[in-house]
């Protein structure tokens, strides 16, 4: 930013000097080079500061340099006349180097203006404390669409394209574009509806299909979901409108975690259940309110099946770490209190013993 300020100040001072005195032709050329170079460097710095492609920055800087230098040594008329004489015809339309250069400069300039306006709008919206993050994102996307449409219309007017010449092809072209961009426009509208409905917001933890993670970004085409493994899934916006979505943080961020635990039939169930609650309450991320609970679910084939129920308020951090911490603590408590963790047991009954194999002796009564 300091370099840009220096270029601007230098160009301003040189402009004052050259307009204050009648310089000789050589001096005018030197000052013209200085002014054109300073302005070109300033334009290049501004465009690069907007994170735009290098070729756009050099194109705008080069056009600025040539225009200012030509103005200082006699005007642009000789250059424009030369560029206008070189060209080609396509049907009833003629394209010259001047018109192609005007189109390229117009596109580059409007691209830079759109980037600058989008950045200014995003900065202004971010400072609006009356809007929550979802509303800010919605306003930002609508403003970006409006800026792009306005830039497109201005560009057509500046270049001088006569849209009436395209009326013959407008019907077929519109039909082709409609079919080709049907999914794109569908995803765009779906993204806007998601933001307006606020059913899915950046930061929400959602489950759709096999994808589980927190919403990182709601884009024009897709929603970015980052899983606990660091993988980023791009889900089309339309899928979130047509498929069932499980949102863990839609109305509240509190989520209940289920942890199944089985104990042996010979152990003290009351003691085992107290130890389960103690292990759950000692976990760092488990909420104190609602308090952890233990339910007896069923009498299984080889174990008495329980389920530990705990609440957490940060589902974006995952639930695997909570389960691991509770089960590790429960293992220690069970070992200290001699609570049996059962092994799978099976009773085998033989309906008919083979004749070639002697039958086992019956157990003797004590």
Image (cartoon, rainbow, N blue to C red):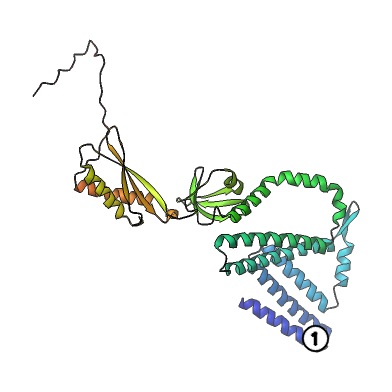
* Residue 94 position in % (x across, y down): 89, 57
Position of residue 206 relative to residue 128, above or below, is above
Asked whether, in this view, residue 358 is left or right of residue 329, the answer is: left
- What residue sits 68% from the left and 78% below the top? 7
**How many residues crowd around disc 1 within 10 Å: few (fewer than 14), some, or many (20 or more)?**
few
- Tell me where residue 142 sits by quadrant: bottom right
Position of residue 137 relative to residue 212, above or below, is below
Between 28 and 268, the one nearer to me in the picture: 268
- What residue sits 85% from the left and 69% below the top? 79
Asked whether, in this view, residue 360 is left or right of residue 295, the answer is: left
* Quadrant of the frame with the C terminus: top left
Counting the numbered discs, the total is: 1
- What residue sits 65% from the left and 79% below the top? 5
* Residue 57 position in % (x across, y down): 69, 66
Q: Farthest residue to the bottom: give it.
A: 21
Q: Farthest residue to the left: give it.
A: 366
Q: Which residue is mark 1?
A: 19
* Quadrant of the frame with the N terminus: bottom right
Between 210 and 16, the one nearer to me in the picture: 210
Between 210 and 108, the one nearer to me in the picture: 210
* Residue 59 position in % (x across, y down): 73, 66
- What residue sits 64% from the left and 49% below the top? 187
Q: Farthest residue to the right: give it.
A: 92
* Residue 221 position in % (x across, y down): 62, 51
Between 100 and 26, the one nearer to me in the picture: 100
Q: Does dot 1 land on a helix, a strand or a loop? A: helix
């Amino acid at each position: 930013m300091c370099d840009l300020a220096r270029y601007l100040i230098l160009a301003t001072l040189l402009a004052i000097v050259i307009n204050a005195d009648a310089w000789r032709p050589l001096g005018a050329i030197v000052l013209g080079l200085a002014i054109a170079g300073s302005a070109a460097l300033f334009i290049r710095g501004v465009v690069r500061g907007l994170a735009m492609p290098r070729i756009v920055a050099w194109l705008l800087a080069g056009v600025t340099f040539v225009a200012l230098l030509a103005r200082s040594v006699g005007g642009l008329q000789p250059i424009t006349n030369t560029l206008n004489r070189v060209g080609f015809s396509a049907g009833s339309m003629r394209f010259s180097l001047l018109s192609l250069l005007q189109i390229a400069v117009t596109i580059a300039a409007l691209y830079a203006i759109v980037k600058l306006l989008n950045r200014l709008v995003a900065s202004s919206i971010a400072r609006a404390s009356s809007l929550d993050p979802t509303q800010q994102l919605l306003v930002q996307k609508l403003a970006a669409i409006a800026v792009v449409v306005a830039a497109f219309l201005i560009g057509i007017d500046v270049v001088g394209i006569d849209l009436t010449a395209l009326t013959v092809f407008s019907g077929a072209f519109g039909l082709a574009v409609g079919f080709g961009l049907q999914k794109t426009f569908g995803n765009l509208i779906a993204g806007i509806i998601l933001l307006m409905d606020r059913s899915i917001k950046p930061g929400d933890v959602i489950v759709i299909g096999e994808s589980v993670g927190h919403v990182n970004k709601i884009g024009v085409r897709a929603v970015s979901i980052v899983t606990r493994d660091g993988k980023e899934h791009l889900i089309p916006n339309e899928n979130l409108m047509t498929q069932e979505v499980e949102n863990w943080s839609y109305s509240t961020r509190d989520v209940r975690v289920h942890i199944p635990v089985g104990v042996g039939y010979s152990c003290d169930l009351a003691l085992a259940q107290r130890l389960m609650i103690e292990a759950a309450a000692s976990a760092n991320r488990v909420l104190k309110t609602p308090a952890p609970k233990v339910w007896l679910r069923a009498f299984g084939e080889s174990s008495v099946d329980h389920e530990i129920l705990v609440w957490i308020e940060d589902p974006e951090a995952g639930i695997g770490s909570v389960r691991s911490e509770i089960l590790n603590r429960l293992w220690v408590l069970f070992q200290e209190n001699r609570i049996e963790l059962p092994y799978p047991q099976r009773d085998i009954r033989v309906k008919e013993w083979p004749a070639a194999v002697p039958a086992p002796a019956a157990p003797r009564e004590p």
